[in-house]
């Protein structure tokens, strides 16, 4: 059965870049929370090597998040499926807050490191500039945000996001979940 790879979103479907951003960033964020919790419990001095990986991957997710947001703003967004305006508004709010998390959590890690006087490297290839300067108060605020938000706020938003997708799939029986799955990268010709 022939088909074409969809690059751009349409009114009814997501293209492969949107799906790729969704899954890579989503799984990356979950992985970073799990890795961060694990890393925090490791004994020093060995755990400091893990901090470098965590910081580099966080900056990669920040970069991908900015690209994803740019892609979203320049493309059609498929219609929100569902029956009630309250559900559509709730979905929109959750999506906006997830974008805030995608950008905000890595930024809080960057600020925490820089304000603490620790460099942020990109996998040893180069260091990001320190735009903050050493600042104990800012570092403390960023540390609190970076420790609290990923576990509680992001965790809650992901639970709502996943519950909403499953609700659409099993209760409403619409295409919301299916149109974001990687298997739907090929648009079948009729």
Image (cartoon, helix red, strand yellow):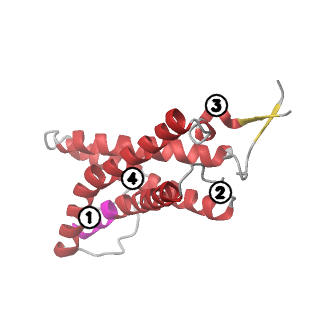
Residue occupying the far right of the picture: 190
Q: Earlier in the sequence, mark 1 or mark 2?
A: 2
Residue 102's tag is: none
* Dominant secondary-structure state across the stretch colored magenta: helix
Give x and y (percent) for residue 95: 48, 57
On the rendered structure, is 118 left or right of 190? Answer: left
Residue drawn at x 84%, y 34% is 189
Residue occupying the far front of the picture: 84
- Disc 1 element: helix
- Point out the stretch of residues depicted in magenta: 108-116
Q: Nearer the viewer, mark 3 or mark 2?
A: 2
Give neighbour class at mark 3: few <14, some 14-19, many 20+ (Cα, 10 Å).
Answer: few
On the rendered structure, is 143 left or right of 186? Answer: left
- Disc 2 element: loop
- Disc 3 element: helix
Q: Earlier in the sequence, mark 3 or mark 2?
A: 2
Cα separation, mark 2 vs mark 4, equals 26 Å
Q: Earlier in the sequence, mark 3 or mark 4?
A: 4
Q: Are marks 1 and 2 in contact (CB under 8 Å)?
A: no
Q: Are marks 3 and 4 in contact (CB under 8 Å)?
A: no
Q: Which residue is mark 2?
A: 77
Q: Earlier in the sequence, mark 1 or mark 4?
A: 4
Residue drawn at x 69%, y 46% is 13
Residue drawn at x 37%, y 51% is 157
Q: Are marks 2 and 4 in contact (CB under 8 Å)?
A: no
Q: Nearer the viewer, mark 3 or mark 4?
A: 3
Give x and y (percent) for residue 187: 76, 36
| Image quadrant in which the C terminus is located | top right
């Amino acid at each position: 059965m022939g088909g074409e790879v969809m690059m751009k979103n349409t009114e009814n479907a997501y293209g492969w870049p949107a799906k790729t951003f969704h899954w890579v960033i989503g799984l990356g964020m979950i992985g970073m929370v799990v890795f961060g919790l694990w890393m925090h419990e490791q004994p020093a001095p060995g755990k400091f090597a893990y901090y470098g990986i965590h910081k580099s991957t966080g900056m990669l997710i920040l970069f991908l998040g900015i690209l994803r947001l740019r892609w979203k703003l320049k493309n059609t967004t498929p219609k929100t499926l569902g029956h009630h305006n309250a559900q559509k508004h709730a979905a929109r709010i959750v999506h906006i807050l997830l974008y805030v998390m995608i950008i905000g959590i890595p930024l809080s890690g960057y600020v925490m490191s820089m304000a603490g006087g620790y460099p942020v490297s990109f996998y040893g290839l180069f260091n990001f500039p320190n735009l903050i300067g050493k600042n104990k108060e800012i570092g403390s605020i960023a540390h609190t945000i970076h420790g609290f938000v990923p576990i509680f706020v992001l965790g809650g938003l992901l639970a709502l996001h996943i519950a909403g997708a499953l609700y659409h799939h099993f209760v409403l029986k619409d295409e919301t979940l299916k149109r974001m799955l990687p298997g739907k990268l090929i648009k079948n010709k009729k």
